[in-house]
Image: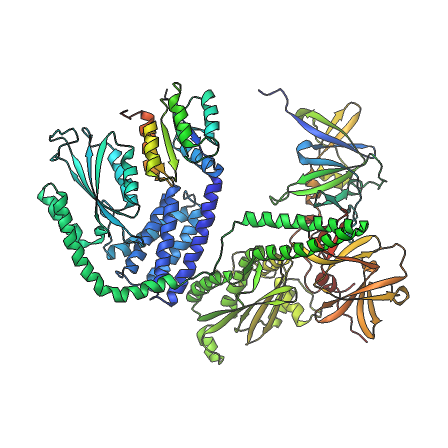
Amino acid sequence: MAMKKRILVVEDFKSIRDYLCQFLGTQGYQTLAATDGQHALEILEIEKVDLIISDFNMPKVNGMELLNEIKKSPAFSNIPVIFLTTEKSLDKMKEAREAGLFAWIKKPYNAPTFLANIDRALANERVSS
Amino acid sequence: MESESITQTYVTFHLAEELFAIKVFEVQEILEMTSLTKVPESSVFLKGIINLRGNILPVVDTRIKFGMEEANYTSRTRVIVINLKLNNKQPLLLGLIVDAVTDVIELPEDSILPPPEINDLKKAAYVTGIVKREQNFLMILNTTKIFSTDETFQISTLAPEAQVAE
Amino acid sequence: MKEYQAEFLEDALDLLADIEKTLLELENSPEQESLVEEVFRIMHTIKGAANMFGLEAIGNLTHQIENIYDAIRSKQYRITEEVLTLTLQAVDHLRNLLNDRSFKNPVNKETHKRIEGQIGKLLSTLQLGEPTFLIQKKEYTNRITYYLILKPLSFIDPDDSTTAYLFSELEELGNCKITEHKRGNRPNNKGEEGDFFGYWDIYLATDQGKEAIEGLFLFVDDQFTVEIFEVAVIDLLEREEFHEKIDELEEKGEILELESLQAYVNELLEIIRLKEVKLLDTDTESASEDIISTKKPNTLKVSREKVDKMMNWVSELVMMQGALKMLAQNNKIAELSAVAEKIDLITGGLRNTVFSISLVPVEVLMTHFSRLIRDLSKSLGKEVTFSMQGKDTELDKKIIDQLTEPLLHILRNSLDHGLETPEERRKAGKPPQGQIVLKAFYSGRHVVIQLEDDGRGIDVERIRKKAEEKGLISRDESLSEQEILQLIFAPGFSTAENVTDVSGRGVGMDVVKQKVNEVKGTVAIQSEIGKGTTLSLKLPLTLSIVEGLLVQTGELTLAIPMAAVHQCYRVKATEVTEAKRFNAAITVEGKQLPALNLRETFGILSAVPATYILVSVIYQGQEFALIVDKVIDQQQLVLKPLGAMYQQHDFLSGASILGDGSLALILDVEQLLSRFKTVSLP
């Protein structure tokens, strides 16, 4: 009995949030949605989540802060996090990498690549360095 | 978890001695009778228009529409604002002037009987059922049917350009 | 997703409209390169967005078309009639696909196959096959060529898809050439050597910068290492010579040392520079032309919702301003009155500007018409020249949207029935090419759109006979020519017999008239046998806010649009004696005016005042008078529709909410007066 994997989508733009959830839904994932990092943390307290896909720039708690919080907390630190963002700065990418980000996907995403990353994240192929 | 019989909520109102009911989700709101602006050349039951928070609401005298005698408006007179959805177009708001609004009640579906032979053809078209409640008979109305046969709603023919003066 | 997709759909439709326009222009000027670039660019944009949404079919098709136009702009192929027609067909099909993205309609599936096949054929004649690693063509920006050495840190499973995805991401950065070396000649980072270590030589030309490349490999840095070297400041991958040389080197199987690579590159660059200098003269000219040609004026694209919201705010403002005015008048505070007046002025200005935003020049119809004429004239075997006068004339976009179908129908009729074949025309002594002119101009507070053809004209007798046959009129009814022509708009007039494939499709002239009426317009026909037919549509400029003259008649408060008002006169009640609705005439200031007593018209029975006010209006060139009790004020009024129940009340444009919350009915003077036949003055 394989359970559907649950992905938490964190994105402050409603239309993108809705679209992503719809898209991931069609790919066989169950989705949860949060409007910003703060909201995401609240959801994590209650719901089981297998993967977090988050925007980088968000109000209240942004992607980076969310990532740090998650990796700090023993309960959530093993949940892989993928950023889906228009942000391109290499420095920010490095910082996120240091903090344990699984993958950084640029918007607009190339669907096959995006999905491949999600698959890898969920299969926990990551060899931690 | 479903109960034995499905119930629906209705708003009931009086017209002279008769009691009527409309499904509550067809009702947008209920207003007190307020000053009407008459629109010339309207049919006899279209009483006029009122200002409903910045929009124009046409108002119908339901007594006249149902073929009853007209009556004076009292402090109990109300305007029931219903939302008609005609021909899949945009919803249309309309006000129905009634003598009084009596109640909001729940009626079990299976208590609704088919309407008896109604002599008045006008009424027959839009009474979809009848319920006996305590000592009274309640006539269930289908608001869409009240106006769908009306010429007012026939959009196809508009007066041609050249018209002879009367 | 719906919002997002809806936005994409809207944008895509706009883009397709742009392409269509450009294609038609291209037909007339096939040498103009900027037009080809435009088509290429737009297809590229649609392709990108479609792929983002996983709309593969659309993405692939646009990609194919992009390739064709790429070939055209790099002069590998010339624009032909065939290509243009095929592209236009593809554009139509894409439009359909946007609404039927999953091919629910089997017709779309077939069309798709057919078009793809035709494009495929075209492409194969150009030998534009697609190598495994896509070599994309030149775009505008500055690309730098990098050389990358990609090494895995441990054994890579040949089935691992990670590299495939990495490579597809690389391709997105720019032109890319990847050579895989299975046998490890290079030691890995741990200094280990061995057969099972593979690596890749990658040449990448991108304008995204080194950071983008680093970013790409950053998240797989536990699996791969990459060394990035900048090799040339131009895109070497565009050059045949480069590819040849690299292939040569790679085949040798040697490890490519950076120095030798660099040396080679420098050599190549020299050769290229020399070539460029020769081409430079001819290149710069056409390049600068492209930059200078600005096709569109300084415009902004604004969402319809925003404009609607803005209109609503302005409407609210106008209503409140009316209330303010009333308060000022009632309270007689000087400063308040002054402020209220200023606000009146400002609101008026704001209103005018905001409403002009939704005004759009009728020119937008031009593409539709040109397209229809092009397609139809071919299939009907008729020659047509189409021109437009007054294309800058502006109309509310909503009205234009409503009228597009009716106008197209009228156009079809004109082409099908109105215009004769070239032989018939020659016989009649007319030039073989038929003329269709679309005119648009302002007239009073209306916009008039006329469609004129110089075809055979309408036989009034035939119309009459037909109407009699259909029972629309009786044999002995006497009708003027105009009235007979108007019968064409009567429902039930056009039937199967005169409906051909072309002008049929269930859009009768009665529907045309109905649509025009819906936007409060009128339609008229003029025709002369042998000479031609003209259809005129008269439409109101905008709908929502009206400058009106508030008047009182009995208990009715009415508003007459200021645009219609000519003058006001005062008359004694005794002079308005006739009980008929339409007074024969009233003499006022020495002239005789036909007058309409609104009390009589509207059946008002309250006590008659001592004096009346005559508000005169101009209707069809004549001055008419409307008799009212008194004039209240002049005000900006927000027109609120009366609703479907009052559809037949054509003499009312709507109602308005006054400052004190009461309602005024807004008169449509045209309709009011048109109901009555003009009474001839003695």
Which of the colour schemes (rainbow, by chain, secondary structure, one colour) is used?
rainbow
Q: In the displayed structure, does residue C157 sit left or right of residue C55?
A: left
In depth, the one of A7 and C535 nearer the eye is A7
Q: Is residue C109 left or right of residue C567?
A: left
Splitting the image into 4 quarters, where does residue C352 fall?
bottom right
Q: Is residue C207 above or below residue C464?
A: above
Decide if residue C676 is on the left or right side of residue C570.
left
Name the quarter where the C terminus of chain B is drawn.
Answer: bottom right
Residue drawn where x is 48% and y is 81% of the image: C429
Measuring from the top left, give residue C34's x and y in whole percent: 36, 62
Which quadrant is the N terminus of chain B positioned in? top right
* Residue in the image at 38% along x and 63% along y: C292
Residue A109 or residue C399, whichever sits in front: A109
Give the quadrant of residue C577: bottom right
Residue C545: x and y in percent read 67, 55
> Residue C196: percent from the left, percent from the top?
13, 30
Left or right of residue C59, residue A59 in this image? right
